[in-house]
Amino acid sequence: MRIIIGGAGEVGRGVARALQDEGRDVVLIDPDPAAIKEAQSIDAFVLLGDVTRRHVLKEAGIKDAGIFIAATGSDERNMLVCALARDLLEEEMPLEKYPNRPHLLTIARIHDAGLIEDEGDRLSRWSGVDVAICAHDASIERLRAGLKSSSLNEVLPLGGDAWIVEVEVSPNASRMASFTLAQAEENIDGLPTAFTLCRKGQRAFIPKPETVIEVGDRLVFATIGEHTFKRISKAAGHDELPYPETPRVAIFGATPLGRQLASAYLEEGSLVTVLDEHLEAANELVGSEIGAHKRLDVIHCNLSDLDMLKEIELVDHDIAIAALEDDHDNIAIAMRAADIGVVRTGLVLDDSALARVVRRIGLTYAVSERRVAIDSILMQVHRRVPGHYQLMPSVPEIVAMSAWIGEGHSRIGEVIEKIERKADSFRIAFVERENTDGSRLMFRAKADMTVKAGDRLMLFVASDDVSTVEKLLER
């Protein structure tokens, strides 16, 4: 099955690279020669052309496509090309003539969250878009989780209350460094199992119980519950202040993203201050649904005015988040907040390379919306196995997934060990299962555990083994 991607920007290239690593048949289209040149390193059919032209989609092989992804920088263009791809396929292979023709799944990246919220299910009806991807909500989820523990390199959701966290082993990790993985788990009560180890100069790998942990290693854990973040951080030798139950939060930017962040923190009982240089944006927030909230302050001010930031007692805020439109403005204001003395600072960027650099500096926690969009699109591409699909940017060789086991699934009754033997690089980390009272609990996977209907498996797999694992778990 061919997958056609319209747009060879960072999102389009990121999706294409991940799918190419799985051995998929991918076509990447863009009218910009510079974007096409940058995409040449991907082992895919790279086509210079305008994705809104029928002859270009024909040349890309729309007749052989099962998925069409629109990842240009324009919402309107993305919706248009999804409708065009559908219409062209119907023209080339009409259902009356080809009744067994597979449905073309159309996925569009949408930047305007309000469009999806306002239109809901109607968007698919009039636009030709089966799945609209907006990264705002998922970016906010990652940012808020990452700010819970400032010493973690990466915090990624795996659905429910399951998380993937990455931490670097410091020289202070007295009960972990120079011990084997099995010994570290004995030394540290409640330490989750590490499923990936990254060592300088080596490819990432899945460690064995006898693997010795060294200072400077980066360990990737699968864990249940945000409360475990501090335990993992402490085990790796990092000390940090306790996270307040209801933090006081400063948000720079009354942008759509800033408003969503404010709503999220207000819902959990926090005191929120939103600051913006533009009077119109500040007034729009004041007049919005949350504008009259008693725990919300909206301030129109010059964000470069240090005296003003001191006057509003920025230093007394537990968290400061930059949610402006420009990446460099976001970095500058987040750094300024850290310099003033705010302990936890975060920001949402577009550029994933900038986000990696900022996190490497270690002064603030950064999330890239483009990176989140790539993960969200890939989750839809892999929807035949319902669940999460999560790339780890610092460990491209390993993919984290989750999979629901429905009634009649072929793996019901099999033990974990038997399922894992069916693929070379495949480990099940946790099993989510319904309790007798109807609640759902997470269990660490054991070799002799039997899979039941209704289970959700959380697992790690080598990127080039994803297709094999999907076949194992799709039915």
Image (cartoon, grey):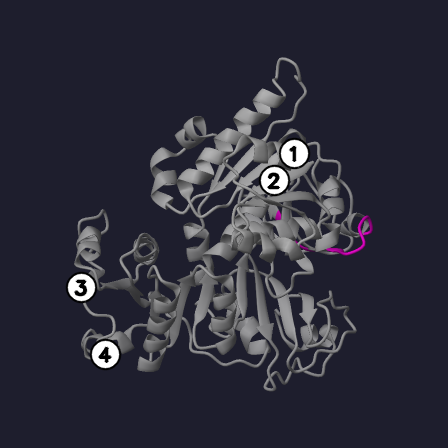
For disc 2, the neighbor class at 10 Å (few under 14, some 14 to 19, many from 20) is many
Tag 3: Cα neighbours inside 10 Å, few (<14), some, or many (≥20)? Answer: some
Mark nearer the viewer, 2 or 1: 1
Is 430 magenta? The answer is yes
Looking at the rendered image, the disc whose residue lies closer to the viewer, 4 or 2, is 2
From the image, tell me which residue sits under label 4. 306
Which amino acid, by three-letter code, is at mark 3?
A: His
Q: Which mark is residue 202?
A: none
Residue at (50, 62) in percent of width and height = 352
Q: Which residue is mark 3?
A: 300
Cα–Cα span, label 4 and label 1: 57 Å
**Circle on res. 61:** 1
* Residues drawn in magenta: 421-432
Residue 20 is covered by the magenta coloring: no
Contact flag, marks 2 and 1 (Cβ < 8 Å): yes
- Residue 159: tell me if it is visible: no
Q: Quadrant of the N terminus?
A: top right
